[in-house]
Image (cartoon, rainbow, N blue to C red):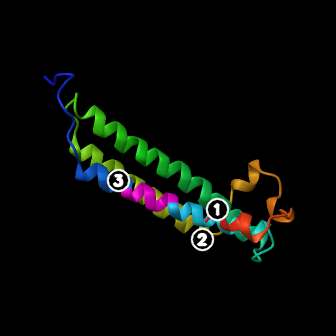
Amino acid sequence: MISKYMPLKSRDDKVVTQMIIAGVVVIAAMIFGVLMLAAQGGFIELQAAAFYQFLTIHGTAMIGASALATSAIMWYFLSHYVDLSKKIFNLNLILFLTGFLMTVIGIFSFEYASSWTFLYPLPHYQVALGVRQVLCFI
């Protein structure tokens, strides 16, 4: 049994791997967010369909990455008190990567862009931002 005063493990490589993957996905989603902002500011030209594809991948990636990071953090702390299956932990990562790959293929190969269903037509409204405001997001 683990005492409440027992120090936590300093590092779990599987958890670190999942956190790095989640971080990379968040950075990729941020790039799509900045591209959408630049399109709204008139710095780049995007068709409405491409804008909504970017919007869909941005939102899906942010939610998926936060779920992956949250599961890794919960795994790290819960594994100190409960004997958890490493196979399930690895399966979680494999399923996440499979789902993410299928989402990317669906959005960019089959032009799936469903995020328009809950947002007004963003590509048709220009945002009055200067270069400095756009660059602060980068």
Q: Is residue 42 magenta?
A: no
| CA neighbours of label 2 inside 10 A, class few (<14), some (14 to 19), many (20+) | some
**Residue extending farthest front:** 132
Instruction: Determine whether, in the image, residue 85 is placed left or right of residue 38.
Output: left
Segment tinted magenta in the rendering: 20-26
The secondary structure making up most of the magenta span is: helix
Q: Mark 1 points at which residue?
A: 137
Q: What residue type is labelled 3?
A: Gln
Please give the label number shown on residue 108.
Answer: 2
Q: Earlier in the sequence, mark 1 or mark 3?
A: 3
Residue 50 occupies which quadrant of the picture?
bottom right
- Which element type, helix, strand or loop, lies under badge 1? loop
Residue at coordinates 23% horizontally, 47% vertically from top-left?
Answer: 11
Q: Image height check: is 119 above or below 38?
A: above
Out of 81 and 95, give the one closest to the viewer: 81
| CA neighbours of label 3 inside 10 A, class few (<14), some (14 to 19), many (20+) | many
Residue 89 occupies which quadrant of the picture?
top left
Instruction: Determine whether, in the image, residue 120 is placed left or right of residue 82.
Output: right
Question: How far across and down, in percent of the image, does residue 97 sit?
Answer: 40, 59
Residue at coordinates 41% horizontally, 53% vertically from top-left?
Answer: 96
Q: Earlier in the sequence, mark 1 or mark 2?
A: 2
Nearest to viewer (mark 1 / mark 2): 1
Q: Which amino acid does label 1 sit on?
A: Phe
**Residue extending farthest left:** 1
- Which element type, helix, strand or loop, lies under badge 3? helix
Q: Name the residue under label 3.
A: 18
Question: How far across and down, in percent of the image, does residue 116 sit?
Answer: 75, 55
Q: In this rendering, does residue 112 appear at all?
A: no
Q: Image height check: is 50 above or below 120?
A: below
